[in-house]
Image (cartoon, grey):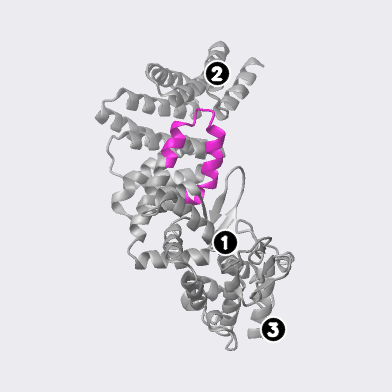
Amino acid sequence: MGELEHDEGGLVVEEVGVVDTDDYLRAVGLGIGGEVVVRVPPLTVPAPDREPSLRGLPRYDAVTLFAERAAAAVPGFVLAEDNRVTVARICQQLDGLPLPIELAAARMRAMSAEQILNRLSDRYKLLTLGARGAPTRQQTLRLSMDWSYDLCTTRERQLWARLSVFAWSFEFDAAEGICVGDLAVEDLLDAVTSLVDKSILIREEPGPVVRFRMLGTLRDYGREKSEQADDHLSLRRRHRDWYQELAVRAQAEWISPRQVEWLLRLTREQPNLREAMGFCLSESDEVGAGLRIAAALFPFWLSRGLFSEGRRWLDRFLSRAPGEPTTERIQALYAGIVLAELQGDNAAGAAMVEEGHALAEQAADATVTALVSQAEGLLAIYTDELPHALGSLEKARDVFAAGDDVPRQVQVLYLLGLAYELHGDLQKAIACHGQVLAITESRGESVIRSYSLWAMGVAAG
């Protein structure tokens, strides 16, 4: 069990046994003509974003394995309502890998399932009770990881450590921008391919692009190696820089034919964007970068309805960043105001508008003042002060119309159209939405265009 089997037709089956999890980590072919490698994935686990029912748990192989091994360690153990979620979380955190699941179940002799789950943050110390008759590499999780690591070339080990900086999954351009280091691009591609062949990386194709994912157990091991090499902090900074640039580029190209492409890319990259912002919060001198990322993600959060998440990040950065009249802070304040008002929190929106006015006075910049006026106009729409809303939004429109900031022009025209419509001036409302439709159609934009089509339909009907 666990060895590569070969037949005359060139089929190589990498057999993953109940204990021989490390074989999943080393997909090694024979390199002969006609050979086909069949890679066996981890055991199935419940989706992390939903709570499994007791009745549905047995269909997940990882949960079944844990329950069987836990019952062997503690006779009488059964899956029940009071432990179903905990067992599912254990299997999820262990990526459905049989060896770690077996080692975790063995700990049931001295710990509850809840205690095991709470200690999985240091899984290498916890998972050390393999069967005495098993090969040495299968007796602890660390020995299994060490054995797989030793099978890699120096270049593959180095890249394994570097790629551990990513959260969940990544695309090749991100690896190229963050992890290439002293490798040539073609060498990086070869090394990534080798890590896929050895199942250190999992290849996924969720759409028109290929992404690579590293299981959490392997990622933790790789991060240990990057920390031992004093490389992890610089990797996290490069990761932060690359994803900051990605977010800013997406914002700049939001009103364009690439909007849907950016929407899908940012959706795929949410774990990495969160990781980058989390790093900015962990370092006192990185707050400004975090504020830029959060402000740039506002159109994405708005279009995806991620109001609460957007507010959480914006509030954390605004509370930590110096209250200087920078464009980034004003943009972040505007984003916070919009998201607060969309959730009916007008008090928070009003407080941020007041801060915005104070910053605008310090900045003495027409664009900053216009952005605050736009935020104030939106607040006035929500508080039913329509004459005030019209005055503020018209001021903002005039400033943005004189510049080349197309996203701001479109946003203020859309809001002004709403304000005119609510005030009963349907002709002006239709004119504003008509301008929005003309701009967005010429640039291939679809999100704000859909909003204006709806609003024009209401006004015309």
The secondary element bearing badge 3 is classed as loop
Q: Magenta stretch: residue 425 in it? A: no
Residue at point 64%, 20% (across, down): 457
Count residues near mark 2 (Cα–Cα under 10 Å), then give few for <14, some for 14-19, many for 20+.
Answer: many
Q: Quadrant of residue 422?
A: top right
User: How much space separates mark 1 and mark 3, taking CA atoms?
Assistant: 41 Å
Between 158 and 357, the one lying in front of the other is: 158
Residue position marked by numbered label 2 in the rendering: 433
Residue that sits furthest to the front in the current view: 33
| Callout 1–callout 2 Cβ contact below 8 Å | no
Q: Magenta stretch: residue 247 in it? A: yes
Q: Give residue 197's mark.
A: 1
Callout 2 amino acid: His
Vertical side of 301 occupied by 384: above or below: above
Horizontal side of residue 433 vs 326, given as left or right: right
Q: Position of residue 167 (x, y in %)?
A: 48, 55
